[in-house]
Amino acid sequence: MGNIRPTFIKRTAIEMLKKYPEEFNDDFEHNKESVNRLAVISTISLRNKVAGYITSYRRVLANKV
């Protein structure tokens, strides 16, 4: 079974992808640093969840194209 993420994590990740599409790729570590640089997120676990969703979202988009 997959992870069920809250809507605010998905919304934040998709907004960041739309605003800064060139800043993210399929690597979680790179995305984690990009999220840390581009947004003020209060906790490390929340930052990791946003970065993880961005990573998985980009992988899904790459498979569809």
Image: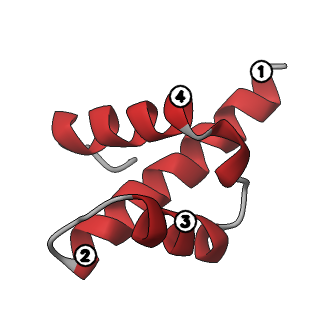
Mark 4, secondary structure of its residue: helix
Determine which of the numbered discs, if any, sits on residue 31 in the image: none
- For image coordinates 31% across by 40% down, the residue present is 12
Q: CA distance from mark 2 to mark 4?
A: 22 Å
Question: Looking at the figure, which quarter contains the C terminus?
Answer: top right
Q: Are marks 4 and 1 in contact (CB under 8 Å)?
A: no
How many marks on residues? Answer: 4
In front here: 38 or 1?
A: 38
Spot occupied by residue 20 in the image (x, y as percentages of width and height): 58, 41
Q: Which residue is mark 4?
A: 18
For label 4, the crowd category at 10 Å Cα-Cα, with few meaning under 14, some 14 to 19 and many 20 or more, is few
Work out whether mark 2 precedes mark 4 in sequence or the reverse, and give the earlier one.
4
Label 1, secondary structure: give it: helix
Q: Earlier in the sequence, mark 4 or mark 1?
A: 4
Residue at image position (80%, 30%) is 63
- Residue at x 32%, y 68% (from the top left corner): 47
Instruction: Count neighbours of disc 2 (C-alpha within 10 A) and say few if under 14, some if 14 to 19, many if 20 or more.
Output: few
Instruction: Give the residue number, with chain letter if any, for mark 3.
Output: 34
Res 34 → quadrant: bottom right
Q: Amino acid at mark 4?
A: Lys
Of label 3 and label 1, which has the lower sequence position? 3
Residue tagged 2 = 45
How are the colours assigned in the image? secondary structure
Picture residue at 61% right of the left edge, 77% below the top? 29
Q: Which residue is mark 1?
A: 64
Would you call the spot at circle 1 few (<14 residues within 10 Å), some (14-19), or many (20 or more)?
few
